[in-house]
Image: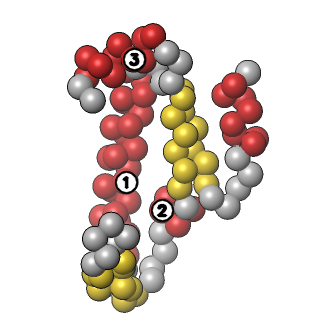
Amino acid sequence: MTEMLKSVYAQRHEVIAVIVRHTEEDFPRKLGEVLLHDPKSTKEHKTFFAQKSIRRYTAHREAHDARLAEHFARYDIRSVKIYTDESPLNKLLPLFR
């Protein structure tokens, strides 16, 4: 969607973004050697997930989150982040009041 279309859509409609993540995505831990499966292409990738990998991954995730926050602020989009191991109702109800 182009920037202009996003702007028009956000101006005419109330948009709420719900970000669902596993806790491990925001707070990764050292896993050592792991085998990752890509569900789309069914390819496998063997990697070593240690402290350096965690720092690099965290930097990419934080940059992505910053771009999302900037986008949401630009178009007045309310958002909430819900982790898969928590109850979503406590976070969703305030958005719809």
Residue depicted at x 34% and y 46%: 64
Q: Is residue 90 above or below residue 43?
A: above
Residues packed near mark 3 inside 10 Å, few (<14), some (14 to 19) or many (20 plus): few
Residue depicted at x 55% and y 61%: 22
Residue depicted at x 27% and y 78%: 43
Q: Which mark is residue 80?
A: none
Cα separation between marks 1 and 2? 9 Å
Q: Which secondary structure lies at badge 2?
A: helix
Q: Residue furthest bottom?
A: 33
| Location of the N terminus (image quadrant) | top left
Cα separation between marks 3 and 1? 26 Å
Q: Amino acid at mark 1?
A: Arg
Q: Which secondary structure lies at badge 1?
A: helix
Q: Which mark is residue 61?
A: 1
Q: Marks 1 and 2: CB-CB under 8 Å?
A: yes
- The disc, 3 or 1, on the residue closer to the chain's N-terminal end is 3
Q: Where residue 30 sits: x, y (%)?
A: 45, 79
Closer to the camera in the image, 57 or 16: 16
Instruction: Say which residue label 2 marks.
Output: 25
| Location of the C terminus (image quadrant) | top right
Q: Is residue 38 above or below residue 11?
A: below
- The disc, 1 or 2, on the residue closer to the chain's N-terminal end is 2
Q: Is residue 31 above or below residue 52?
A: below
Instruction: Say which residue label 3 marks.
Output: 9
